[in-house]
Image: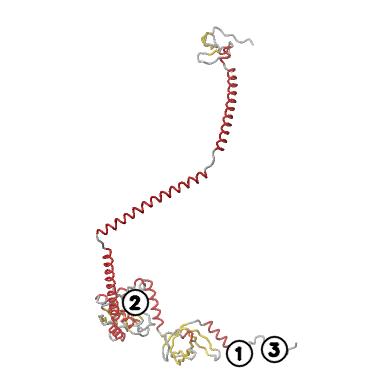
Amino acid sequence: MNTDSRFANPVNTPSVMTVSALNQAVAQLLERNLPLTWVSGEISNFTRAASGHWYFTLKDNAAQVRAVMFRGRAQYADFQPKEGDKVEVRALVTLYAPRGDYQLSVEAIRRAGVGNLYEAFLRLKAQLTQEGLFDADRKRPLPTFVRTIGIVTSPQAAALRDVLTTLQRRAPHVNVILYPTPVQGEGAGLKIAQAIASAAAREECDVLLVCRGGGSMEDLWAFNEEIVARTIVNCPMPVIAGIGHETDFTIADFAADVRAATPTAAAELAATPRSEWMQLLQRQAQLLSRSMHRRLDHHAQTLDWQSRRLLSPKAAIAARRLHVTQLARSLSYTASTSLNQARHELAQLKQAWQAQRPGVATPRLILAEWQRRLQNAAKRHQDTNRQRLQTLQAQLEMLNPQRTLERGYAILSDHKGKVLRNTAELKPQTLLQVRLAEGTADICISSVQASLD
């Protein structure tokens, strides 16, 4: 196929990209090179779409950027921002391809400045947890019956009015002591701790309420200070913390013996309603009355039963005599029955033994035959041994030196008893002993002659 060289692409000419491909490449480049990061700014043009997504602009004095927070992330935010709010967002920088606008895809949002406070909150919480200040086994139970309740809060706080109203309605018999203190602002944490310490030193109340109404994290920060937590832990009476709303948590909540969702809930936990005590007393009185009636009825019934059992001594003796007679008869019958049964069993066992007893006639015959054979074998063995003994005796008799002497021989020995066998052992004028067939004699050698052989 021939191609006109005039229409051939130069070697270094770049390929042509579409707008979509370009935007996708830029989006990938942004997401790859700019990691997830925190960005601070002011909310502008905030819109919450029907889909649940949030669209807004984040700006400062010199620039602005579009942002989107999708419904899956927005539903976990603890507040909904409004125009002019200072916020911090954790976002990924990306590009909206259809318009070619770069934007922030927001993962999380918080009020400006809250991040540092929250990090300080987490550090202190971890430290005090490691020290054991929040351990469940350290928590003290609330008293069953409360006579006096102490309240640590501001006299101007709406929470105080809620607590007093609740206590007046539920437990008007309970005394209330206020330990006033600022609950917000500079130095509020130290003053709250001093108020708690004052209540602990005066020991006027059975339980202590530390409370205030809701607010932002900055408003509640006084209750996140370490001195407040340690003072609560060292307080001798149980402490109930009712700070903020149900979703608000402070260090004081963890340090307290009981955490209530709101100040009103703290008041409800502190004292049992008077109506409940009255109902309890009424139920106890009814139970006591029923128990007493049951006990009296039981004793009356027991008395009737005992009176029916009460007999005259004569009747009691007659009943005992009749009982003894019956026992004697029963014993006699039992003894005779047992003896007859034992005799019957013995007869049966004897019959069974006779039936199983082996015959002894045949074994006796066999034993007699073996005894006869044994005696015959012993006699034969004895005769054989006697014959062998006679033969050996005859042979021994033939070898007896005494018989040799009886044939005319003699035995010559020196004065030491040594038998002499050679003339070389004889010396003249030597005294020797001669043993004959009958007796011995002493001789003296006059001369010795050598053998001529």
The one nearer the camera, 206 or 81, is: 206
- Residue drawn at point x = 36 percent, y = 76 percent: 254
Q: CA distance from mark 3 to mark 2?
A: 84 Å
Residue type at mark 1 is Thr
Mark 3 or mark 2: whose residue is earlier in sequence: 3
Residue 445, relative to residue 344: is it above or below? above
Per the image, label 2 sits on a secondary structure element best described as strand
Identify the residue under disc 2: 258
Left or right relative to 159: residue 53: right
Q: Which mark is residue 8?
A: 3
Mark 2 nearby-residue class (10 Å; few <14, some 14–19, many ≥20) = many
Asked if the residue at tag 3 contacts the one at tag 1, i.e. Cβ–Cβ closer than 8 Å, the answer is no
Where residue 282 sits, quadrant-wise, is bottom left
Image quadrant in which the N terminus is located: bottom right
Which circle's residue, 1 or 3, is located before the other in the chain?
A: 3
Q: Quadrant of the C terminus?
A: top right
Asked if residue 390 shows in the view, the reply is yes
144 horizontally vs 41: left or right: left
Q: Amino acid at mark 2?
A: Val
Where residue 60 sits in the image (x, y, percent)? 44, 89
- What is the x, y in percent for residue 74? 46, 86
Residue 288, percent across and down? 28, 74
Q: Is residue 177 above or below residue 415?
A: below
Mark 1 highlights which residue?
18
Q: Is residue 136 left or right of residue 205?
A: right
- Amino acid, disc 3: Ala
